[in-house]
Image: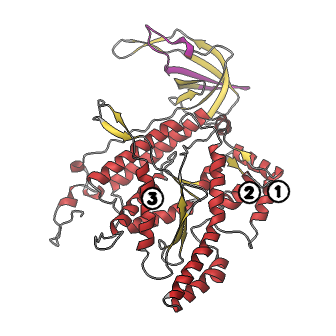
Amino acid sequence: MSLMTSLLRMRAATTGHAQRASRLRHLHLNDQPLMLLTLKRTGPAARPLAVMLGTDPRHPQLLIAPPSGSTTPMLAALADTVTAHIDSRKQHTEHLPATANKPARQRYSDAPQILVPNPQTVQHLKALGDDLRFRTVDDRMPGSRSVQRLGHWLTYLTDRTDIPGSAALIPVTDFLAMHWITGQSPLEDEDLTTLLAWIDPPLNAASGRDAAQQAEDPATHRSAGPATDAAFDNDQLAPLFLAFARAEGGDRARILQDLDRLLAAYLQPTWDRMWQAYGLLQALPEAHGTARRWVHERTTFSKECDHLAHDGRPRPARDEAGAAATRLVVRERTAAAFAAERAADDPFVRAELRTTGEAFGGTVAGIDPERIVHGPTGRARWRPRFTLSTTDPVHMEPGQLLTSHLRRNARYQLCEVTYEDDATLVELEITAGMGRVISPTHAVLPTVGDFLVLTQAPDHYQMPELPAREHTPWTHGGPPRDRTDDSGEDGTEQ
């Protein structure tokens, strides 16, 4: 926890009101996202109990799994709704011309977006996806193929939550906590009810703290899922399940109606809070870098649709070592780029990074605007240098590439840091954004006395270079996978 975050949390605890931690919204929000609430049964981790979902806050769809028997009909109905939402984002495409590295291709103009209450729901959907995508398809069973396809999409969406800045599947508590700091612990922030009470308390509440304390009343508090409250399980669910097991025929239908009403009443408050949170987040101005990240989301979605259309094999239960290494590098680089873009966009984020030494602000003390260097080929390059005087901590190494929100296209390379008694002098070289020697862009040059805040430059994602499969050791998924083992069974994946 940074110094700024600690300060805001203490201020929230003192005043009783949540504090803004971000001036802008850093994730894209669709006009009609799919809200998805889940409840699961105790016992098998992925066995669902109920799902409430939809794109209309006034008309949610409730799907109930029977207390005993097959859940396939309920999962097939869930698959139909989720697939319909995904297909609705595939109505329009845009043409991308060929480049030096990629052929011409089509990309969808939109992508699906699903909002869930908390990270625990993401883990439940991940477990459900792992279970469903490997199910055998039996065309004699209605819904069998759509249920397997649901497992594929759940795996894709939950995998996207591992990518910082992705907006395909968003836990709302994490989204809110990115933009507001409350006076409770980060663990307590995972409860949607108390988190929203802090951020947007009712009009009759004296403060967010008082509203959160009232929301914690065990008599009225309801978990946002996927696990249910123990008291609810024992006092209300268990008697219905027992009655269902003992009943026959028409009595079972009546008990299922009672179960439907009970679970609808349980989920409705969370459903309303999800749309309340959506309204709060939608009202925030969108950050500049959000549009670029959503374009990447659409690109990834388009590739996944192509995979399903031409291959369709489910992702393996475990990644090979090479694939796992690639996924880790992608996550690390994307996290660094997301953090840098947030800092370039948002003054609140820049202020926090200045307390940690990951950004610094200072006054231009001197500049060499006509500096020219010659590259290995002898070509002249314009490389102005200037010195920034700052009292902020500077925890960066020479060679670090920096940017300023005032001149987003410019790049500054940190050359040298000199510590003096009353200030720190940072020498910087402008390496991009100033044009060429024959046609320089002087607007990028600061003047003596200007105040600049510099943050790490976004490192746009590039796939790491890995050896070809035939050059990869067998320990990392190389050629032995296609050979016959000693037992005489083919080791190729089906």
Q: Position of residue 195 (x, y in %)?
A: 69, 57
Eye-nearest disc, 1 or 3? 3
Identity, as a three-letter code, of the amino acid under mark 1: Ala
Q: Earlier in the sequence, mark 1 or mark 3?
A: 3
| Residue at 61% in and 86% down | 239
Q: Quadrant of residue 140?
A: bottom left
Q: Which residue is mark 2?
A: 197
Q: Please report contact status of discs 1 and 2: CB closer than 8 Å, yes or no.
A: yes
Mark carried by residue 38 = none
Identity, as a three-letter code, of the amino acid under mark 3: Val
Which of the pair 278/387 is nearer the observer? 278
Q: Please report contact status of discs 1 and 3: CB closer than 8 Å, yes or no.
A: no
Q: Is residue 377 left or right of residue 201?
A: left
Eye-nearest disc, 3 or 2? 3
Q: Position of residue 47 (x, y in %)?
A: 47, 74
Q: Which residue is mark 1?
A: 205
**Residue 267 makes an appearance in the image:** yes
Mark carried by residue 82 = 3
Which of the pair 39/171 is nearer the observer? 39
Q: Is residue 379 above or below residue 66?
A: above
Identity, as a three-letter code, of the amino acid under mark 2: Ala
Give the residues drawn in magenta, as a range.
Answer: 417-443
Q: Quadrant of residue 152?
A: bottom left
Which of the pair 276/392 is nearer the observer? 276
Q: Is residue 440 above or below residue 399?
A: above
